Amino acid sequence: MEFSIYDFTSFTKSLDKLLNENMSSFWATSIEMLLIGVGILAFYALVGLFLVYAERKVCAFIQNRVGPNRVGPYGIIQTIADLFKLLMKELIPIKNADKLLFNIAPFIVIIASFLAIAAIPFAKGLHAIDFNIGIFYVIAVSSMGVIGVLLAGWSSNNKYSLIGAMRSGAQIVSYELSVGLSLITMVIFAGSMQFSVIVEAQRDGWFLFRGHIPAIIAFVVYLIACTAETNRGPFDLAEAESELTAGYHVEYSGIKFAFFFLAEYMNMFIVASIAATVFLGGWMPLHVGGFSGFNHVMDFIPPFFWYIGKTFFIIFIMMLFKWTFPRLRIDQLLTLEWKYLLPINLVNVVLMALIVLNGWHF
Amino acid sequence: MGLIKYISGIFKGVWSLLQGMAVTSSYFVRPWTIVTQQYPENRKGNKRGRSKKKLEMFERFRGELVMPHSENNEHKCSACGICEMNCPNGTIEVISKMEVNEEGKKKRALDKYVYHLGMCTFCGLCVKACPSGAICFSQNFEHAVFNRAKLNKILNNEGSKLLKGVE
């Protein structure tokens, strides 16, 4: 069983072979699913904890503060301490709440983001499911989260959470359109919805550079729309602290609140990794067509680190959005989507189709 | 005309957003502009590099009431009791005694100047009202003690006298 940090394909293949030789295919598949599930779960928790810490540090530096710096060196254990605090807190039962919906809502939110992470390629061969409709699958699955948000707001029997959930619903449903259309622009360029094909197509240059003008427009639109879709940044009216106290999760406490909190950060991670995969080449190192020496040097950095670096670059941009811009009003939010992003996107799709048909790209 | 306005509006909007992001990201890459002081470390002017600046409270800060003494252990308090009357909380108790001075006259003098820190709201009326400038606020702000009785302080030193010339 050979193991290479540059290519996981042979490693996963030999693992599969080993399992299939020793047991029936049912058990082999079950163990594989279990391994991947546990692996993704551990990754999920780690990334969630790190993102909360990163967000607090980034916002502190932007606002000329220090941020968490007491628990552990530079405060790195702060989020773990916060997690333990949340785990030990009492789960407060709500009188007159819809018990069933109230209890399953956090799980729906977290399952939606968990399903989406399965289709993301982390490195060469490190890819749970490689659908031929990967992008379509991710868009479909990640929009399921809004059901959990709406259920949480509705079942809490609280006017603040209901208003927050309704705002969130309106926002996610309308911005879903822009996310989909900007990804469709790139699907036209790539000619495929399969993530592995899209990444492989960026071997000689990332789509952001190869697709030039329409790709850059799609990238900007995607960044704005996915920030809105994850209820973050200037688009956080769904949980506007100053108006709605916390929005749809105002009645949740303890670990159920932590689920919403974690899902919000993981959704950010997922949209950032899709952006990194579709626009910035995913795990593919920075290659410039023709410069083989330069490409060779870039290949020495393992693909996983390329993927993580690009994803965290996008996440940093989203954090910069959040801590720079003031919150939009609900009518401004819908104006931005329906009067600006959607028309720009539709024109952009036509532009991209023209460029692909005429071969005006690199 | 409408279309030109629409498109130029988009570019203007994007430009102003980029300006805002330039400001925040310039702060992000300049950690030395951090204004937060880190309290326990900066008490003595820390060496570990976190915050090299020593903590110094500004002059008008009202930390606690003190009575300055000269090097000959002399204060300026004539025990008139105006500060005691001006204090809204009964924080100050001026205990006086009668003394015979060189000319053989009986005169009131300060015995104990009791200051109950636990009752003080740091309004500063006593310092404003004092006719001879005998009391002032110091910059010390670390008042935590384990016993409430320790908050009752006597401000005049043992065996201190009234400064000559203060009536």
Image (cartoon, coloured by chain):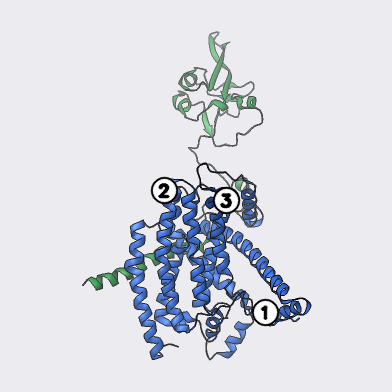
Q: Which residue is mark 3?
A: B53
Q: Nearer the viewer, residue A222 or A180?
A: A180
Asked if badges 2 and 1 are on one and the same chain, I answer yes
Residue at point 55% right, 73% down? A310
Q: Nearer the viewer, residue B162 or A334?
A: A334
Check the residue under mark 1 and report the chain it is in. Answer: A
Check the residue under mark 2 and report the chain it is in. Answer: A
Say whether residue A3 is visible.
no
- Measured as percent of width and height from the top left, residue A235 is found at 42, 59
The type of residue carrying mark 2 is Glu
The type of residue carrying mark 1 is Phe
Number of numbered discs overlaid on the protein picture? 3
Looking at the image, the residue that sits furthest to the left is B1
Which of the two marks, 1 or 3, is nearer to us in this view?
Answer: 1
Check the residue under mark 3 and report the chain it is in. Answer: B
Residue at point 45% right, 26% down? B125
In the rendering, what colour is chain A?
Answer: blue
Determine whether, in the image, residue A360 is placed left or right of residue A201: left
Q: Which residue is mark 1?
A: A8
Determine whether, in the image, residue A351 is placed left or right of residue A283: left
Q: Residues within 10 Å of mark 2 (few under 14, many from 20)?
A: few
Element carrying mark 2? helix
Q: Is residue A305 above or below residue B101?
A: below
